[in-house]
Image: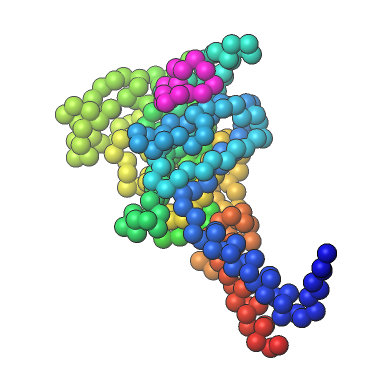
Amino acid sequence: MIITVLHSPVSFCYIILSFLFFHALHLVGSDGATITIVNRCSFTVWPGILSNAGSGDIGTTGFELASGGSRSFQAPASWSGRFWARTGCNFDSDTGQGTCLTGDCGSNQVECNGAGAKPPATLAEFTIGSGPSDPARKQDFYDVSLVDGYNVPMLVEASGGSEGTCLTTGCVSDLNQKCPTELRFGSGSACKSACEAFGSPEYCCSGAYASPTECKPSTYSEIFKSACPRSYSYAFDDATSTFTCTDADYTITLCPSLPSQKSAANGWREGGGLRESSPSPLSTWLSDVFTSDSSNVHSSHFLLMFTIFLLLLLRQF
């Protein structure tokens, strides 16, 4: 066996450069987005996933997630769909059949198998950009919707993205505690939307009210909007509720007790509002570089900068 010993520091640097270069290219050139669900609730939840028509699935349509647990999914370019939390589920250990108190998808199984959440349920909705293959539509769109009511607090954070707002959105307030009596679901485990509670066209933005000019915020939707100003409160609440980002990964946190460092950098404060001032772009960027996961684009920027540094160092030999 022949063992090659590298005596030259230049050879050693080239090995490091090759590794960093190809790793950085892999990070920058990847399509789609990693979406991670984190359960900070004090109880087990059963997240449900519904892919929109033509999007295909991302590995599962429903699963059990214990308190403190997390699970990640790779959503390919052009994927769109929604995530939500089912609570109070009871599935038979032998047959696997059962139902959930809130967010039930009616499949009678842990997997939702293409069925959506029965209201009321807090929803995280995504449309992932088409990637480099279609430069005209690279941006992701995402939101947290209370249009179908509310069952658990939810936060969506973008990491490593660019070319968009890339802001944190969601609802950290416990709307079950603030829910009007007429919207209360069961013993208070969820809060219905006015559409679900009353079925009236003016609340559902249907019939003669099926347009932004005719369907306006109601007293009930304004309760939701006041508590959670970045979430959808009714069907045409797009202007302050839809966010965009490019080449980002996303974390959905259920029952977030406190805003994360990333949320704080995005101007988030407890209670759903915006802070009066936000960090400078430079301090936010530095925070992202040193706190984000190594799979995001900011990490690749850091690797590329390090590569350039090594290249300059090589010129000294």
Q: Is residue 237 above or below residue 302?
A: above
In this view of the protein, which residue sits in the foreground, 177 or 37? 37
* Residue 181 occupies quadrant: top left
Colour scheme employed for the rendering of this structure:
rainbow
* Residue 139 occupies quadrant: bottom left
Q: Residue at x 55, y 13 (%)?
A: 97
Is residue 107 on the magenta stretch?
yes
Look at the magenta stretch and give its main secondary structure: loop
The count of marks equals 0
Judge left or right: residue 279 versus residue 5.
left
Answer whether residue 56 is visible to the viewer in this image: yes
**Image coords of residue 162 (percent x, y):** 45, 60
Q: Is residue 248 above or below residue 42?
A: below
Q: Quadrant of the C terminus?
A: bottom right
**Image coords of residue 128 (percent x, y):** 41, 47
Q: Which residues are magenta?
A: 105-118
Answer whether residue 175 is visible to the viewer in this image: no
Q: Quadrant of the N terminus?
A: bottom right
Q: Residue at x 38, y 51 (%)?
A: 130
Judge left or right: residue 158 versus residue 219.
right
Q: Is residue 255 above or below residue 98?
A: below
**Image coords of residue 190 (percent x, y):** 48, 23
In this view of the protein, which residue sits in the foreground, 94 or 271? 94
Q: Residue at x 21, y 32 (%)?
A: 210
Judge left or right: residue 115 versus residue 152.
left
**Image coords of residue 240 (percent x, y):** 36, 47
